[in-house]
Image (cartoon, grey):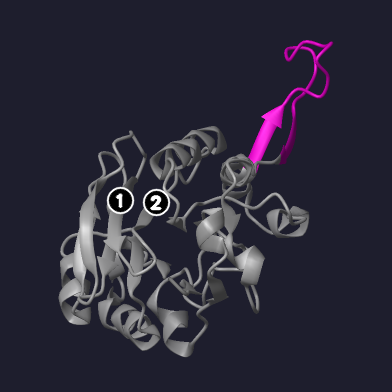
Amino acid sequence: MTYNIKTGGYDSSRGTRLEPIAEVIGSALPDVVALQELRGDSGPWLAERLGMRMIRARSSWGQPVAVLVGPEWTVLSAGSVARPFHHAAARVEIATLGGPLTVICAHLHPHWGWRRMHEARWLVTAVGRNRHALVLGDLNTLDPWTDHQERLAALPAPYRVRHLRWRPPGRERSDRDVATVARVDTRAIAALDAAGLVDVFRAVGDGPAETAPTALGGAEFSGMRLDYLFATPALADRLRSCHVVRTPTADRASDHYPVIAEIDI
């Protein structure tokens, strides 16, 4: 499961949302959970509440991420992906009967597509030659296989620009003489796809793909898929299902819905 829990499960006006978040996760009984937007003691609280082990990656500029692993699994190695992510990326290797499984939890740059593209390439490097690897998290990026014009038109301009890539309309003319035009920036997802990683929802997903916003709202969203799982080809052969968890509790626990996949490893 991957889940952006929004500002660590804390709101200045509503108080804590940690109990609903724990209910959403616990009801799904996941073996591995990738969490984004941790704050304060939210990660340790959730790990203890769910009876899972937590591996956290700290952030220099943004918010930490963490991977929670069920108690029945052996963690072979754990740590941060040593790159200057705006938020963070955590890497955990877990022993399974099908061989080691590498899990990488990431939260990509929220505002700048060029930076997201480079962060996605760092994730590809972190996967390396691992046969069974899973990259999952809030990638803050639209996919290159969908027409996004309508949902982008519904966004206020300050949020729409996050998903646009600006370029001059003609190489033969100067940027100074010709106004720039924009196209949807999907480079981060395209980088993962170009590296041979498989979009799990696109391969076996069922139901609506959009992950934000929930009923909790969020002006920066307009019915968008921003949360993903990507698998190496060998792991993709073991995919069984994938869906966005939409429940009344998930509606009020965060502004993102979690995504969960079943993999027979």
Q: Is residue 84 located in the magenta-colored stretch of the structure?
A: no
- Badge 2 element: strand
Query: Which one is nearer the viewer's eye here, 34 or 184?
Result: 34
Q: Which residue is mark 2?
A: 106
**Which residue position holds label 1?**
90
Residue 134 location, x and y as percent?
44, 57
Q: How many other residues sit within 10 Å of disc 2, few (<14), some (14-19) or many (≥20)?
A: many
Q: Secondary structure at mark 1?
A: strand
Nearest the eye: 254 or 191: 191
Query: Residue 47 placed where, x, y %?
Result: 20, 72
Quadrant holding the C terminus: bottom left
Residue 95, horizontal then vertical, whole percent: 28, 63
Q: Picture quarter containing residue 42?
A: bottom left
Which residues are the magenta region? 164-183
Q: Can residue 223 be seen in this snapshot? A: no
In-front residue for pair 186/15: 186
Residue found 26% across the figure and 69% down from its top: 69
Label 2 to label 1, Cα distance in Å?
A: 7 Å
Q: Is residue 75 left or right of residue 227?
A: left
* Foreground residue among 161 and 12: 161
Labels 2 and 1: the sequence-earlier one: 1
Q: Main secondary structure of the magenta part?
A: loop
Q: Residues within 10 Å of mark 1 (few under 14, many from 20)?
A: many
Quadrant in which the N terminus is drawn: bottom left
The three-letter amino acid code for the residue at tag 2 is: Ala
The disc label shown at residue 70, or none = none
* In this rendering, position of residue 208 left or right of residue 93: right
Residue type highlighted by circle 1: Ala
Give yes or no for contact between labels 2 and 1 (Cβ–Cβ under 8 Å). yes
Q: Is residue 234 above or below residue 175?
A: below
Question: Going 51% across and 65% down the picture, which residue do you hit?
Answer: 218
Q: How many marks?
A: 2
